[in-house]
Amino acid sequence: MKLITRALFVALLALGLPGQASSVPGAAGNFTLKSAAGSNVRLSEYRGQVVMLNFWASWCGPCRQEFPHLDTLHRKYAGLGFTVFGINVEQDRSQADKVLRDIPVSFPILFDDGNEVSELYGVDAMPMTLLLDRNGIVRHLHRGYKPGYEDTYEMQVRALVKE
C-alpha cells in the first residue's frame, strides 16, 4: 500500500496544477532551435548559466502579459549568468513575429515549430516556464501565469544565481 501511495503522489506531483510551481529535479533535455535572429541556439552551450525556458504562443494572453516581466528579469540578472529563452511553439511564426513587434524583448526568442522540444519537456500549459540551474538541472516548473508570479520567479532566479 505504501508503494502505491508513493507512486500516486509522484504522479500527482508530476501533473501539478495550472499555475502551481512544482519541483521537478532532473537533467534538462538538450536541444537546438533556430532563433529569431537566425542563428542556431544549443541549450548545452549555456551550461554554467541559470536558464529560464518559457514556452509561449501568440494566442496566449497570459504569455503576452508575462513577457515584460521576463524581460525585466533577463536584463536585471544577465550580468550574473542568467538568461531567458522564449520558446514559441507555433508552426507558423508570423503571429509570433507580430507579438514581438508589439512587445519587444531583449532575451532570445526560439522557434519550436515542429514541437519536438515542447514534447521533450512535456509542455501541457501556456505559458510553461522552467528554471534550470548552472548544471542543467530543472529546479522549478511553473504552469500558467497570473500577475504576481514574477515575484516567485525573481526569488527563484536570485537563489539559483547565488549557488
Image (spheres, grey):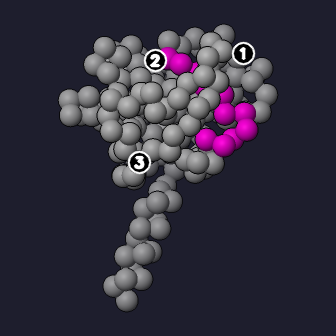
Q: Is residue 111 shown in magenta? A: yes
User: Can you tell which of label 2 and label 3 is closer to the viewer?
Assistant: 3
Q: Nearer the viewer, residue 16 or 6?
A: 6
Q: Which residue is mark 1?
A: 98
Q: Which residues are magenta?
A: 107-117
Left or right of 137 on screen, residue 12: right
Question: What's the CA distance linking mark 2 and mark 3?
Answer: 25 Å
Total labels drawn: 3
Q: Is residue 36 shown in magenta? A: no
Q: Quadrant of residue 142?
A: top left
Question: What's the CA distance linking mark 1 and mark 2?
Answer: 17 Å
**Residue at left 42%, top 62%?**
13
Q: Are marks 2 and 3 in contact (CB under 8 Å)?
A: no
Q: Which residue is mark 3?
A: 27
Report if residue 148 is visible in the image.
no
Q: Amino acid at mark 1?
A: Lys
Q: Amino acid at mark 2?
A: Asp
Q: Residues within 10 Å of mark 1 (few under 14, many from 20)?
A: few
Location of residue 125 in the rendering, given as x and y in whole percent from the top left corner: 59, 46
Q: Which residue is mark 2?
A: 71
Query: Regarding mark 1 in the picture, which secondary structure is present there?
Result: helix
In this picture, is 94 found above or below 63?
above
Name which of mark 1 and mark 2 comes first in the sequence.
Answer: 2
Left or right of 162 on screen, residue 39: right
Report if residue 55 is visible in the image.
yes
